[in-house]
């Protein structure tokens, strides 16, 4: 029997965050960003980029942008909102050219405001360039200070603009050389696409923390994208993943590759497999859907329970719930219906809607739940507040028992590489034991998949992944400034830290 924890054990922030959870969507780690690049002279590149971004919408819903070049002029269009809200026929018609990049954003550095939307366009003595970035630079603040001291002004407070300005600073007529010099200065996680007037350049950080893949279209044209699902939607054939530290140049002559910065240990974000990537995407040659189903199989082995029905928390918990049901031979059922039209751009709810809370997003199916012993499968718990409300929903709908199964290990450490998991104080597993979390969420039992189980499900060694949010082993050292989180640059600038010009103090190192 799990050990019960008293109410005094729960940090106040877990309950006070419930309203915030509702406002910002749910209790999962927040996605990062998605990037797309295409070189297809003679094609309607803006439209293809639109489709690619649409497929990557799950990676960021705050803003979207596309930049195109017709070989002479580079033009950008970006705004706050979903891809379908930002672009209409008229906007797409105005974006003419054979080279393009696109971006969907969830803010992991810098506020969610238009000046931080991407692609970022900067002027260089040799023409405009546009940059779109997925990831997080851990040395962004000192780089930004350095550029400001050289008289460069910034429109926004995001690390992507720092990358763009750094490239512009090094641009002496050879863009590829400038990019290589800029990449050598970057620390952290990045998947970059860069647009010049006649080429698209893609680059990935030396650990390959954020994903990036290369695909081929007909007529010798090429695309790059955060995930393979964006290749599929534009009819591109998957060629390969961009390697850690690699730079890929795509122009009218085809594809050229360079090892731009020395490759480190490959450390793809493990959460891509657990939650972020779309189920129909592949990474490391593996299907996300199949890996998640196998996580469900192993979760059933590690945490069996007698029950009448297995239900997912839709949609991301579905593959693991299918797997749990397959292995346990407990029937799979739909117990929660999700309103798919609540996005992050949902209107600010007034008091009446706040009272409705989680019911605006998830409705329990009494037919599935009443009188049943229910296994509820989800992929992660961050703060625990949403899970607690869902458990309550199930009980209100008549569930006799609620057994919560999570297809990942407890999320104990914050991410500094482009995923908004909240700070350590917001992570329920950072301060509470599993039995205390069970008590907090009100479940009869609670079981997390072990890290070993996750690796068995994927079929790869743990050394191939960043798994720092589970074990605290950060593959790239985190300077103290970065601990300020997504508003680091706002805070950094406001405090005048630039004037002090102190070298970063490193807090966490991996042996
Ligand atoms: S810390 Fe976690 S979420 Fe961040 S890159 Fe590593 S595995 Fe992914």
Image: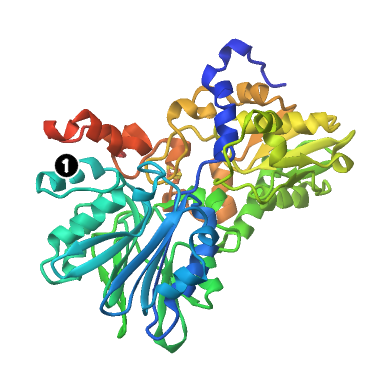
Is residue 117 placed above or below 349 in the rendered structure? Answer: below
User: Residue 407 or 426: which is nearer the viewer?
Assistant: 426
User: Residue 493 or 407: which is nearer the viewer?
Assistant: 493
Judged from this view, the residue extending furthest toward the front is 90
* Quadrant where ligand 1 appears: top left
User: Residue 315 or 67: which is nearer the viewer?
Assistant: 67
Residue 406 in picture, x, y percent from top left: 64, 39
Instruction: Describe residue 84's horizontal placement relative to residue 67 as left or right.
Output: right
Residue denoted by label 1: 145
Crowdedness near tag 1: few (<14), some (14–19) or many (≥20) residues, C-alpha within 10 Å = many
Instruction: Describe residue 458's horizontal placement relative to residue 139 as left or right.
Output: right
Q: Quadrant of the N terminus?
A: top right
Is residue 330 placed above or below 100 in the rendered structure? Answer: above
Residue 282 visible to an observer of this rendering: no
Residue 477 in picture, x, y percent from top left: 29, 40
User: Residue 238 or 68: which is nearer the viewer?
Assistant: 68
Q: Quadrant of the C terminus?
A: top left
Q: Residue at x 37, y 72 (%)?
A: 100
Tag count in the figure? 1
Q: Ligand 1: does it lie within 8 Å of the C-beta at label 1?
A: no
């Amino acid at each position: 029997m799990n050990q019960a924890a008293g109410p005094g054990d729960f940090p106040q922030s877990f309950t006070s965050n419930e309203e915030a959870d509702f406002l910002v969507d749910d209790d999962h780690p927040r996605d990062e960003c998605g990037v797309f690049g295409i070189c297809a002279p003679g094609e309607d590149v803006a439209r293809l980029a639109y489709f690619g971004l649409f497929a990557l919408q799950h990676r960021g819903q705050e803003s979207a942008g596309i930049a195109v070049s017709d070989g002479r002029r580079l033009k950008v269009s970006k705004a706050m909102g979903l891809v379908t809200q930002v672009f209409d026929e008229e906007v797409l018609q105005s974006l003419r050219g054979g080279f393009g990049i696109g971006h969907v954003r969830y803010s992991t550095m810098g506020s969610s405001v238009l000046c931080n939307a991407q692609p970022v366009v900067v002027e260089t003595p040799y023409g405009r360039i546009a940059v779109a970035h997925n990831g997080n630079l851990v040395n962004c603040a000192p780089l930004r200070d350095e550029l400001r001291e050289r008289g460069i002004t910034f429109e926004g407070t995001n690390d992507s603009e720092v990358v763009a300005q750094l490239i512009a600073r090094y641009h002496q007529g050879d863009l590829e050389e400038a990019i290589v010099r800029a990449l050598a200065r970057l620390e952290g996680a990045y998947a970059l696409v860069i647009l010049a007037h006649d080429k698209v350049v893609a680059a990935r950080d030396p650990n390959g923390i954020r994903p990036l893949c290369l695909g081929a279209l007909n007529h010798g044209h090429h695309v790059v994208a955060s995930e393979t699902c964006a290749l599929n939607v534009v009819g591109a054939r998957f060629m390969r993943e961009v390697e850690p530290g690699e730079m890929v140049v795509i122009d009218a002559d085809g594809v050229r590759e360079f090892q731009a910065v020395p490759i480190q240990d490959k450390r793809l974000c493990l959460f891509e497999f657990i939650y972020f990537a779309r189920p129909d995407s592949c990474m490391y040659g593996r299907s996300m859907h199949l890996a998640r189903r196998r996580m469900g199989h192993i979760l059933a082995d590690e945490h069996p329970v007698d029950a009448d029905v297995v239900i997912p928390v839709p949609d991301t918990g579905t593959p693991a719930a299918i797997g749990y049901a397959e292995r346990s031979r407990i029937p799979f059922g739909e117990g929660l219906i999700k309103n798919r039209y609540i996005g992050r751009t949902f209107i600010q709810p007034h008091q009446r809607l706040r009272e409705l809370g989680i019911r605006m997003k998830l409705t329990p199916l009494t037919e599935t739940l009443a009188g049943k012993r229910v296994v509820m499968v989800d992929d992660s718990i961050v703060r625990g507040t949403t899970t607690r409300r869902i458990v309550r929903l199930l009980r209100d709908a008549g569930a006799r028992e609620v057994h919560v199964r999570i297809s990942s290990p407890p999320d104990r450490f914050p991410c500094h590489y482009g995923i908004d998991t909240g700070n350590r104080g917001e992570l329920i597993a950072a301060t509470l034991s599993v039995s205390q979390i069970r008590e907090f969420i009100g479940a009869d039992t609670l079981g997390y998949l072990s890290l070993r189980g996750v690796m068995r499900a994927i079929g790869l060694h743990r050394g191939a992944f960043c798994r720092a949010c589970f074990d605290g082993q950060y593959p790239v050292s985190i300077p103290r400034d970065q601990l300020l989180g997504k508003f680091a640059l706002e805070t950094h600038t406001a405090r005048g830290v630039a004037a002090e010009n102190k070298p970063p103090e490193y807090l966490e190192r991996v042996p």
